[in-house]
Image: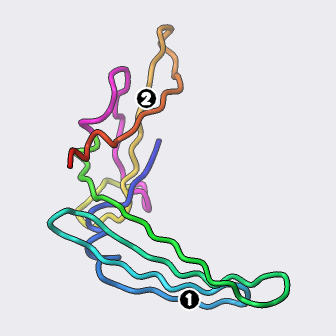
Amino acid sequence: MFDISTSYKMQHVLGKNTFAESHEDIAFIWENEYDPLGKTLQFDMTLFLESEDELFERHFESHHLKAYEKEEILTCVPEGFKCLEVLDGDTLNDLHTTSERALFILQASNRRGTVGREYWQVDQLDKS
């Protein structure tokens, strides 16, 4: 079982939006930039974390995500696995065009026919 953010979420929810929150011991600014041609999302987070001496330290993170459609992910399911379902990750109902998370439920079988543990990567999707 694994879930991903959908391309709908990356483009329409996060998109080119900025989010900010301030709490007693942490504050952050989260800036997003979606590229519809490359279907990529670049987001930068500036975090202000309270230290032991009650001063706030600034930290910075930058993330680069690629949006994949359900069909693209399913082409990467390795041999020996089968996809049982793809659901809306927030409601556990059917996946729909405005779902923000896609939950993939796969099953792997070992030689005895029982569920086994396997690990795989989707980096084979990004051929650029």
Q: Which residues are magenta?
A: 74-92
Image depth: mark 2 or mark 1 in front: 1
Tell me how far mark 2 sits from mark 1, CA to CA.
Answer: 39 Å
> Badges 2 and 1: C-beta atoms under 8 Å apart?
no
Residue tagged by mark 1?
21
Number of numbered discs visible in the structure rendering: 2
- Looking at the rendered structure, the kind of residue marked 2 is Gln
- Looking at the rendered structure, the kind of residue marked 1 is Glu
Q: Position of residue 89 (x, y in %)?
A: 42, 57
Category of crowding for the residue at label 2, using alpha-carbon neighbours closer than 10 angstroms: few (below 14), some (14–19), many (at least 20): some
Q: Position of residue 72 (x, y in %)?
A: 22, 44
Image height of 46 relative to 128, above or below: below
Category of crowding for the residue at label 1, using alpha-carbon neighbours closer than 10 angstroms: few (below 14), some (14–19), many (at least 20): few
45 vs 113, nearest the viewer? 45
Q: Position of residue 125 (x, y in %)?
A: 26, 43
Q: Quadrant of the rendered structure where residue 9 is? A: bottom left
98 vs 32, nearest the viewer? 32
